[in-house]
Amino acid sequence: MLAQLPRHPVKPLLCIIGEPTELKPVLGQIRQTRHTLRCTGGGVSFGLCAPKRQRHRVCGAVDRRPESNGLATARSELHDSRFDPPFSTVQTDLISGGKALKLNVVPADCPFDFEVRALPGQDPQAVTDQLARYAEQQVLPHMRAVNGQSSICLSELSAYPELLTDTRSHAVRLISQFCGSSAFATVAFGTEGGLLDAVGIHTVVCGPGSMDQGHKGDEFISVEQLDACDAMLERIARSL
């Protein structure tokens, strides 16, 4: 679809991404990459052994790397007050490994997922590249000294670009009329909005519900928000 839209004779005036924003128009989002880093080469019985320590070093490095690569996590001059939080973030999301019944058996395979959420204008790939170099140059030699078949592999799970829609655009005036608000905001999560914006389609994020109630076991959208969304859709239909 992204490849076809720029060549289509009729161009969209506006794209609305319906993520939960309490129906407030969102013009900006962060840039995000998600990766899996897989360490292999265990499967043997050790106590506090070298392979286990080295894997801890790799996983712990995810939190330390931003301090030296220029992301706004550490340098206040790169902070952006339009976003909450006003800095980039790096975190480990999921760690798995180990199938033995004994605690002193090092997992033969231990992958972990991490994500980088970067402010617009900053490159999350810098974190990934630095972590890959650290793993290959500082950690892997110690693992192979114990097991020559050890490896550390990095693979991308997903990535999407930032979104910063121009407040002066016609699309912004339209969404302001549709949702009844010109209190433009930003979000610290990502959508496909940046992909659409990159092919020339003005995009905003605006939908019912709040992320405060999302990503939980009992996530919900209130009836009042759904009613307000119906009213917004009616205004869009009348406009068309």
Image (tube, rainbow, N blue to C red):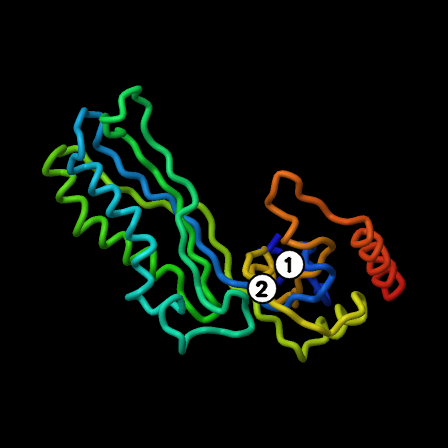
Q: Which mark is residue 199?
A: 2
The first of marks 2 and 1 along the sequence is 1
Which residue occupies 73% across, 74% down? Answer: 182
Q: CA distance from mark 2 to mark 1?
A: 8 Å
Q: Quadrant of the C terminus?
A: bottom right
Which residue occupies 31% across, 35% down? Answer: 110
Horizontally, is 83 left or right of 228 in the view? Answer: left
52 or 159: which is nearer to us? 52
Question: Which image quadrant for residue 141?
Answer: top left
Which residue lies under the disc numbered 1? 5
Where is residue 224 drawn, in percent x and y? 82, 53
Helix, strand or loop under label 2: loop
Total residue callouts: 2
Residue contact at pointers 2 and 1, CB within 8 angstroms? yes
Horizontally, is 81 left or right of 69 in the view? Answer: right
Which residue occupies 18% across, 34% down? Answer: 48
The type of residue carrying mark 2 is Val
Where is residue 49 drawn, in percent x and y? 16, 34
Helix, strand or loop under label 1: helix
Q: Residue furthest right?
A: 238
Characterize the local packing of mark 1: few (<14), some (14-19) or many (20 or more) Cα atoms within 10 angstroms: some
Question: Which image quadrant for residue 200?
Answer: bottom right
The type of residue carrying mark 1 is Leu
Where is residue 104 drawn, in percent x and y? 22, 26
Where is residue 112 drawn, in percent x and y? 36, 41
